Amino acid sequence: MPSAVEVKIFKEFSKYPRRSYPKGQILIFADETPEHVFYIIKGRVRMYDVSYRGEEVIVNLFKPPAFFPISEAINHLPNKYFYKTETQADIFIVPVDAALKFIKDNPDVLFDLVSRVYRGMEGLLSRMVHLMSGSAKSRILYELLIECRRFGSMNKDGSCDLDISEVDLSARAGMTRETVSREMKKIKTEGLVVISPQGIKVKNIKTLEKIAGEQF
């Protein structure tokens, strides 16, 4: 059930144009100064950079209810990243000035936004620790856990279904596809995951959490 703040944001932003985008649609290019804030109500959007190898490295993922890009809008700075729909997505397009005025005029919305930012920072800091100190396997296990917690379909038996591929996982972890494929084979052999054309199933998230902790 949506919170009072979420209802308030939806009521305000639904005054603006609603657009439906197909999977793979780039919404914002790197080095582009955003003129609008995007309020996502359906689907997922990935925020990413491109490595020197030409591969996508995912910085963040947005799902309903979320609006972006906020830092660039507040500071009037050029955007450094690409934003692209990861699935079909429905989004309200809100002028930057209107979005910022609404946030400033509503302390409860501002507090909710700050809370979301700090939760996101905690996740980024944890990821940095794993990137600097963990093995390739522990980094992948950590990404699987994040994916389960944020986007996975949890089942009663403790398993989790993820609609992602190894290519998606490599972009999330910032690792080469070859490395991810090699490590995923080991993780699959250990009976922790099942890989199919539909995605990845984590067989037991509690077990994965325990092993991820031991690996790190």
Image (cartoon, helix red, strand yellow):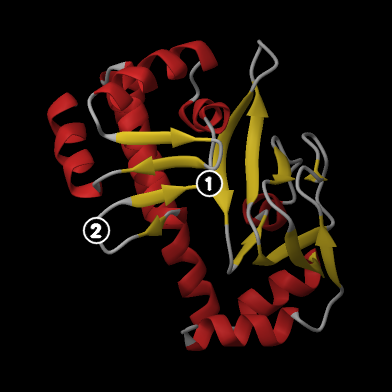
Image side of residue 25 versus residue 133, left or right = right
- Give percent across and percent down for residue 212: 21, 33
How many other residues sit within 10 Å of disc 1, few (<14), some (14-19) or many (≥20)?
A: some
| Quadrant of the snapshot with the C terminus | top left
Identify residue type, mark 2.
Asp
**Element marked by disc 1:** loop
Q: Please give the residue where the numbered disc 2 appears in the rendered image.
A: 157
Q: Is residue 194 left or right of residue 24?
A: left
Q: Which residue is mark 1?
A: 163
Label placed on residue 24: none
How far, Cα to Cα, is label 2 from label 1?
Answer: 18 Å
- Residue 59 position by quadrant: top right
| Other residues around mark 2 within 10 Å, as few (<14) / some (14–19) / many (≥20) | few
Closer to us: 142 or 60: 142
* Coordinates of residue 125 in the picture (x, y in percent): 35, 38
- Confirm whether residue 107 shows in the render: no
Relative to 208, is 8 on the left or the right? right
Give the answer, above or below, for where 11 lies relative to 104.
Answer: below
The answer to whether residue 29 shows anywhere in this view is yes
- Residue at 71 percent across and 76 percent down: it is 101
Q: Residue at x 35, y 59 (%)?
A: 154
**Quadrant of the rendered image containing residue 97:** bottom right
